[in-house]
Image: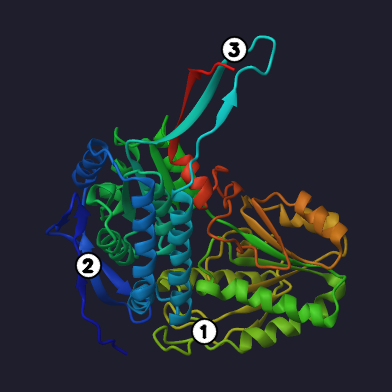
Amino acid sequence: MTINVEIRNEGMRIGGEKVFTDDVVPVHYPYTDEIIGTVPAGGAGHAARAFQIAADYTPVLTRYERQQILFRAAELIREKRDWLAKWLTLELGICHQHALYETGRSYDVFTLAGQMAILDDGQIFSCDLTPQGKDRKIFTKREPVRAISAITPFNHPLNMVSHKIAPAIATNNCVVCKPTELTPLTAIALADILYEAGLPHEMFQIVTGWPKDIGDEMITNDNIDIITFTGGVPVGKMIADKAGYKRTALELGGNDPLIILNDLSDADLEKAATIAVAGATGNSGQRCTAVKRILVQESVADRFVPKVLEKARAIKFGDPMDPDTQLGCVVHARAAELFEKRVLMAAEEGAEILYHPGRQGALLPPIVVDRVPHGSELVMEETFGPIVPIVRVPDNDEEVMAISNSTEFGLSSGVCTNDLNRAIAYINGLNVGTCNIWEQPGYRIEMSPFGGIKDSGNAVKEGVLEAMKFFTNVKTYSLPWPR
């Protein structure tokens, strides 16, 4: 099968110019492996130039102007949602339905950042509070940094970039973004949307290239004050090592459990199965917060598993461009092969494959695997695809929490229970950044704090509010203030 699409040969966006190179990075459509676009194979010099432009520029946008740019960008995303969703599908391979959902989330990011941009973020402290006090007041204000380096992942080419640039605009910062070479086209499209919305070109620049050629400059350039990275654990730890004194926000992997407790009725188990399958297969399972392990207590497992199987069998997987498709591809065939291999390894360890209609290249179906040993690689590592692995766990909550906490990750979790005391115990007992009761591990709004601990991140939270704080320096000043 071939697709009828005009190949996009994009340039970098540096200081208001479209910059091309002789060598290019091809962008593939995962479903057919066709080349659907190219971006420049930029190098350290391109990144250095962009950072110099960013550091030399002093943004002077008022709060009102920042708000209006953010609001206009949101409206342009809404107007171009079908076009953006088409290219999200083409470069990532997720189904059109999931791509439309991502455009909606990005709209939310920009509207919420716009709302926050007009709020004054200073504080006031009276100084006559103690016997040693004076007739003064202390004030704080937040100021932008020189330049922010944003290194973004393949799995959310629009929303993850939005989460880095929208709070930066709200705080009058300049960003140089290096999107992953796998899915760079959407980030470039977003840059053009922001310029159309009125953002000065110096405030958001896009550089592209292979990590070996451009990666170090995105970390070590002297003009960088902050590095914000979303991606894999090894790269995140390498950035932490090389960044030195620079501030870093590292949002890394996840191995998120959905925990099904034994106080549930059949109707509750039906609801839990819906959450489980949707959480495991959304965005083709390519979310750090996707359901990677379903921990179900033994006494309800036999009633729960058939419900999961039924819902997984009902998912229509196939051509990502078909509007009726509910599950598209993972990012490339190599990833699909790895995840299928982990399933087969788990089967050798005693797991039962209940549903596996067959992989075709990067097209990986929602494979349902029951009785997965909790130490299996399938559920100890971050399996970044639409696998639905069921781990049967004891009817003892302390043991379940120990199993849940036994991986190197600590991002998000979900718990299905109707017992408030048990819910509170899990919220307190799970070593994660987020614990959602009766919801997918990944549930959040774009404003709320998001991030993990352990190998899931360095506990610097994302979300519009937290990012706006992180992207600024607090300056304290005081004035005489007679009573």
Measuring from the top left, give residue 58's x and y in whole percent.
27, 38
User: Residue placed farthest to the left in the image?
Assistant: 22
| Residue 231 appears in the rendering | no
Measuring from the top left, give residue 230's x and y in whole percent.
45, 53
Measuring from the top left, give residue 419's x and y in whole percent.
87, 64
| Quarter containing the N terminus | bottom left
Measuring from the top left, give residue 298's x and y in whole percent.
84, 71
**Mark 1 is on which residue type?**
Gln
- Are the residues at dot 1 and dot 2 in contact (C-beta closer than 8 Å)? no
User: Residue placed farthest to the top in the image?
Assistant: 132
**Mark 2 is on which residue type?**
Thr
Separation (CA) of disc 1 from disc 2: 28 Å
Residue carrying label 3: 134
| Residue 136 appears in the rendering | yes
Residue at 21%, 41% in the rendered image: 53
Vertically, is 445 above or below 27?
above
Separation (CA) of disc 1 from disc 3: 65 Å
Vertically, is 300 above or below 182?
below
Residue at 24%, 71% in the rendered image: 37
| Quarter containing the C terminus | top right
Tell me which corner region of the image, top left, top right, bottom left or bottom right, holds residue 344.
bottom right
Residue carrying label 2: 38
Task: Give residue 326's mark.
Answer: 1
Vertically, is 363 above or below 297?
below
Q: Circle 1 — which element?
A: loop
| Mark closest to the chain's N terminus, 1 or 2 | 2
How many residues crowd mark 2 within 10 Å: few (<14), some (14–19), many (20+)? Answer: many
How many residues crowd mark 3 within 10 Å: few (<14), some (14–19), many (20+)? Answer: some
Q: Circle 2 — which element?
A: strand
Residue at 39%, 57% in the rendered image: 161
Task: Give residue 295's mark.
Answer: none
